[in-house]
Image (cartoon, helix red, strand yellow):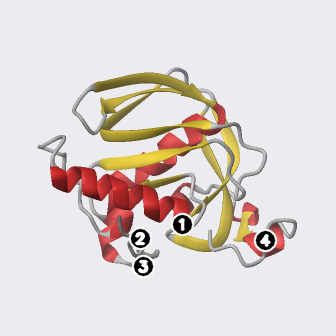
Amino acid sequence: MTIREILKMGDPRLLLIAKPVQSFNTREMRTLIGDMFDTMHSVNGAGLAAPQIGVDLALVIFGFKQNQRYPDAQPVPETVLINPTITPISDAEEEGWEGCLSVPGLRGKVPRFARIRYTGFDEAGQVIDREAEGFHARVVQHECDHLIGKLYPMRVRDFTQFGYTSVLFPELDANEDD
């Protein structure tokens, strides 16, 4: 597999609405998904959306047992989610710190729905229908935002809670590339 270049904020491709996936379980799709996991793991990511590597498809991956960029986060099941839909289970929101591989070196406090239901398909075209809360719900919402051309700074409400990771969280590796 291949580690792909991750697009950075300012690249207009990150602002596009991703196209739905039409074909499942193809060699090209398996290669893309493998490349996405290799890319995500190479930078200790919690998730990655296809648009972040310049692929205009409604495809996200996420999941980890433990993540050094989010040391207090509970494990999230490794998932391939294609053509996702997110439905809030309630209007309750939680604010939490987020970073992004496309916005390196920065973190911001972002409000997200506390509990969601997400549906879509896996790489073989099998239906996924799950409920999530906490960090799991946050990761899914963050990654799916990439499919509608949104980066997390667009959701920050209080910019006093936005800044460089090395300043906000000096205990984390100052050289990390969020």
First of labels 3, 4 by sequence position: 3
- Which label sits on residue 173? 4
Q: Is residue 67 above or below residue 122?
A: below
Residue 104 percent across, percent down from the top left: 59, 74
Q: Distance from label 4 to label 2 (Cα)?
A: 22 Å
Q: Which residue is mark 1?
A: 42
Indicate the amino acid at tag 1.
Ser
Q: Is residue 173 above or below residue 50?
A: below
First of labels 1, 3 by sequence position: 3
Cβ–Cβ below 8 Å for labels 1 and 2? yes
Indicate the amino acid at tag 2.
Ile
The kind of secondary structure element at disc 4 is loop
Q: Which quadrant does the C terminus fall into?
A: bottom right
Image quarter for residue 23?
top left
Residue 158 percent across, percent down from the top left: 69, 58
Q: Residues within 10 Å of mark 1 (few under 14, many from 20)?
A: few
